Image: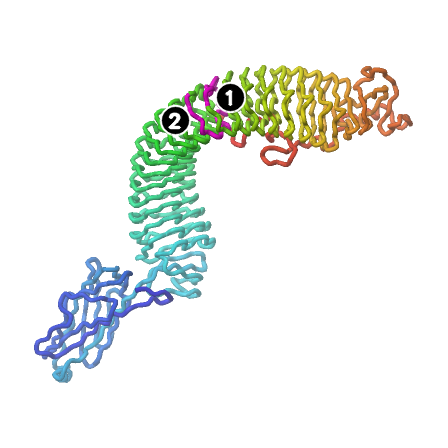
Amino acid sequence: MRTRGKLLGAFLGALSLAAALTAAPSPALADGAQIDVSVPTTVPCFVKHDGTVITPSSWKMKNTGSEEVSLGKISVTPHDKKIGLSASSSMDDGAKSQWFSYQNDGSFSQAKTGEVLAPGASVSVDWSVGKLDAAANASTLKAAANGTFALAKVDFTFGQKQAFAVWYSDGTAGLYKRLEVPAVGDTFDGRTVTKVVTGIEDKTELFKNDGDVTSVTAVDEGIRPRTTSEWFRTCYHLKSVDLSKLDTSRLTSMYQTFYECYNLSSLDLSGWDTSKVTTMTGTFYRCQSLPSLDVSGWDTSSVTSMNQTFERCIKLTSLDVSNWNVSNVKYTGEMFYGCTRLVTLDVSNWNVSNVTNASGMFSSCASLPKIGVSDWNVSNVTDTSGMFNDCKSLTKIDVSKWNVSKVSNMDSMFSYDYALADLDVSNWNVSNVTNMYRMFYSCSSLPSLDVSDWNVSKVTTMEDMFSGCSSLPSLDVSSWKVSKVTTMTGMFRGCKKLPTVNVSNWDTSSVTEMNVMFSGCSSLASLDVLNWNMSKVTSAWNMFSDCNALTTIEVSRWDTSSITNMQAMFSNCTSLASIDVSHWNTSKVENMSGTFSGCSSLTSIGVSGWNTSSVTRMSSMFSGCSSLTSLDLSKWDTSNVTNTQEMFSGCSLLASLDISSWNTSNVRYMEEMFKNCSSLVSIDVSGWNTSNVSFSGGLLYNCSSLQSITIGPQWTKGLAGSGLPDTLYGADGTAYAIANVPAGVAGTYYTKAEYVPQAKAEYVPQGDPAGKDDDKASAPEASAAGRDNKSDADSIQDTGSENGSPEGSDNSEGPDSPAANGQDETPLAA
């Protein structure tokens, strides 16, 4: 029976003493009988003619209800104060006992109240009622001849103690179990009550999100929670918790009990009975101030979920869970994730045969030098993603005997294990794996890796799989069946010791992304990808960037009709002497920034037939192609191009370039477009429209062989700041300060007077376009005014990039920048 409120509802077991004069008395309650304390019961007593009181002996009171009850009060009501009656009784539940005595005046004394009767429990009771004094009670005994009469009534008040929590004005809180509950504003336990919550044994989220509580203590014994789920979740200012008096024998859930208790610095739960607990998910998640935790004696035999149990307990240096019984556990995902200072952890004897998800289990345990899992039975595990991710101190791990036949996800399983130098996975059955994303990412110390016999036929992603494996001298993947793979982005990126990799027979018909696939493979001298099916590939930016040992690559048969991004595709392939891309279908390509940037050995590139109608970005496309002597781009459609920054910068052997008919009406960025084209003799941009150009500084900077430039009526930007000499000469020999070259007027201008077919000596200084009033500004003054006349805007870089920066910048960190070619936001190990 249970009621809620300030005073817990109680029931009365009215155990009445009644005496009767009979010839052969027979007690209504037999010796050894049992009564239900939840209902009123009469315990009859008989009086003999000599005053002896007869009572039943060794009877029991039993709790037949579903909740605990407690003996809260005993009272005696004599029916006749003239009767000199005394009585005593003892109760014994086999472990505890108590006694009390009472007199006919209603007074009594007792050793103890508060005896708890659990559901179904009983208490043995022995009564002893003193003999009536015949002389003193003669009239009473004489009256008894006419029948029975009551001697006295003894009332036992049984009630249910209530478990409740009290918040105090000083930021502390207490847990209690009593018959009476205080109210807000009361002084209780010497402090002012600000909040009360009852029924806490079945309460979840007891203190959740409480930003004021700093200390919680279980004051009373007998509090028996069934759950502590989210009790202290996100109590960011909680510093101390004393729950040593809790009876956790019926506790089943510890879900996120201390979740994100950032400031909790001490916690003793070593005595907790966890035998019935089924979930420990997130129990100590981000308890980042706890330096130690004793859970060594916990009985975890009933637990099924341990996801995130100790995640990000960053101050723990050791944790003894060696004797834990995890035989029923199914989920250990991120169990020790982020325990960055943990240096010892013994799980070698764990029975993980029922575990299905071990994702991120030891992820970011950066100080663990070893993890003993060699004998683990992982035959039921389906997810090992991130399991050993970022275990930076791990040099060896023995998983050679693991049965991984049910695993489908190996995403980032060993990624960032920089020190890992010994790993044998050669016998693994990976036939059900679909995800190998970043599986060995940045395992930069691995000297060998045998995956030659792996069945990868179900894998769909291999992105960054071997990226950063910079110590691997060889890798045999020649027999792999990759027909279901859709992304190979970064797959071999940074494998700088690989001289070759045999992927010639790969079926790439499902692949859509090959970005940075071989980027940084600086020892790769040859690569056979001629027969690859590229029909679904949409993005190949930086695919071969920084493959500076690659001399040839045959890609002439590739179907590139779906590609939209070729940014930096071959950038910095400094040894590449020839490449045939003449038949490529580039009709969907939008980004050609840096495609051939830094290909310093290429003498020619057959791209005259390329369809560039969709291209918007051509920045740095041929920059650094210092051996290029000719380039036919005359028929290119540039009507959608917005960025040509540094497009031909550093093409030092390029003597001519026919781009006169280009449609540049949408171009905004032209900075340093022809910078360091030191062999360029003339340039005709007569058909160019520069009305939308915002930045053109250094357009022709250091074009030391340039003799003439031809502009047309839509050239509206002038030539100031272009890097040309301060004085230019018109076709009629007129000398112009560069700032005074007429904008929007077609004409050819020469860099030196001797280059003019019919040279004339007339000079038009700045401020005098008609050539008059020469005394107002001398030629040297005009020259000084025009020298290096770059606007502030010339220093602004194009921020348009793949990462969502504002349109137009090709700064050093943007994806169009040659310096950034082949890089992503995650650094690789050296």
Residue 444 appears at what percent x and percent y? 45, 25
Seen in the picture, residue 222 relative to 823 is either above or below; the reply is below
27 inside magenta stretch: no
Q: Depth check: 307 or 452 in front?
A: 452
What amino acid does circle 2 point to? Asn
- The reply to whether residue 736 is in sight is yes
At horizontal 74% and vertical 16% (from top left) the residue drawn is 681
What residue is shown with label 2? 455
Position of residue 779 measured from the top left corner of the image (x, y, whole percent): 85, 23
Q: Which residues are magenta?
A: 479-506
Q: Work out whether 553 lies above or below 370.
A: above
Name the foreground residue: 30 vs 273. Answer: 30
What SS does tag 2 mark?
A: loop
Asked if residue 324 shows in the view, the reply is: no
Magenta-drawn stretch, dominant element (helix, strand or loop): loop
Q: Is residue 491 magenta?
A: yes
Image quadrant in which you'd find residue 421:
top left
Q: Which mark is residue 521?
A: 1
Under circle 1, the secondary element is: loop
Task: Pinpoint residue 297: horizontal percent, then vertical percent.
Answer: 29, 44
